[in-house]
Amino acid sequence: GENVEQHPSTLSVQEGDSAVIKCTYSDSASNYFPWYKQELGKRPQLIIDIRSNVGEKKDQRIAVTLNKTAKHFSLHITETQPEDSAVYFCAPQAGTALIFGKGTTLSVSS
Amino acid sequence: DTGVSQNPRHKITKRGQNVTFRCDPISEHNRLYWYRQTLGQGPEFLTYFQNEAQLEKSRLLSDRFSAERPKGSFSTLEIQRTEQGDSAMYLCASSSDRGQYEQYFGPGTRLTVT
């Protein structure tokens, strides 16, 4: 089955800095690569996704890059704000199920 | 608000009791998923419905767990003879099958087995 790893597990940045979270996966059949944000006690919220025929996608301060050859994709957040503090999960899709990583706790201090 | 709703939001039960959770997906979504999330972990896939058909079940879904989606709209997840290890957040998600992959999650039902 799919093996998903996220790095780092925790990330602390100053407000205004950039943050990058990397996700590696094992199933070469994966063709959909979303990132979810989960605040404490809340539901996972889809923030950005990319499909396997695209290398990069950007939405305002958030971007995702995909390297299918190396089987990894990354979340990039620029100009971080305190409200970006949350747990971020990558969840590559193999078949119908999303396979979630263990999460990265991002802390943005002002 | 993504539109997926779940009830109840919290459930406390004693070991050995049966519990049932309900999920109402986004109205035009015909795909429905159940996941389980324990503290400090990402959600883990349990099962998947397309319309009323249960098409995929994880090995995590023991025979004490059963899920239904009788009319292809809402779904229920029942756990029989609950165990303390069943304590978790049970999340429901839905998606469309019109060439889109996005899964939108409900707020979850937090189960505590004492």
Image (cartoon, rainbow, N blue to C red):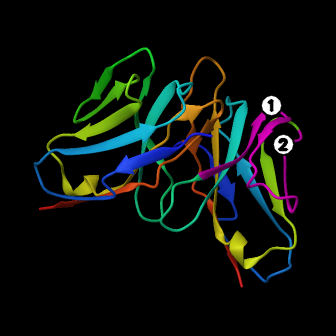
Q: Residue at x 71, y 70 (%)?
A: B86
| Relative to A84, residue A24 above or below | above
In the image, B101: left or right of A60? right
Q: Which mark is residue A56?
A: none
Q: Residue at x 49, y 50 (%)?
A: A44
Circle 1 sits in a helix, a strand or a loop, which is it? loop
- Of all residues, the one furthest to the top in this rendering is A53
The answer to whether any part of residue A89 appears in the image is: no
In-front residue for pair B9/A23: A23
Q: Chain of mark 2?
A: B
- Say which quadrant the N terminus of chain A sits in: top right
Dot 1 alpha-carbon crowd within 10 angstroms: few under 14, some 14 to 19, many 20 or more = some
Q: Chain of mark 1?
A: B
In the image, A96: left or right of A8? right
The answer to whether any part of residue A72 appears in the image is: yes
In-front residue for pair A5/B17: A5
| Relative to B68, residue B109 above or below | below
| Rendered location of residue B27, percent (x, y) | 68, 34
| Rendered location of residue B51, percent (x, y) | 80, 31
Q: Is residue B54 magenta?
A: yes
Q: Disc 1, disc 2: CB below 8 Å?
A: yes
First to last magenta residue range: B44-70
In the image, B45: left or right of B13? left
Mark 1 residue type: Asn
- Say which quadrant the C terminus of chain A sits in: bottom left
Q: Is residue B106 magenta?
A: no
| Rendered location of residue A106, percent (x, y) | 28, 57
Residue where numbered disc 2 is placed:
B69
Residue where numbered disc 1 is placed:
B51
Q: Residue at x 82, y 58 (%)?
A: B62
Circle 2 sits in a helix, a strand or a loop, which is it? loop
Sequence order check, earlier mark of 1 and 2: 1
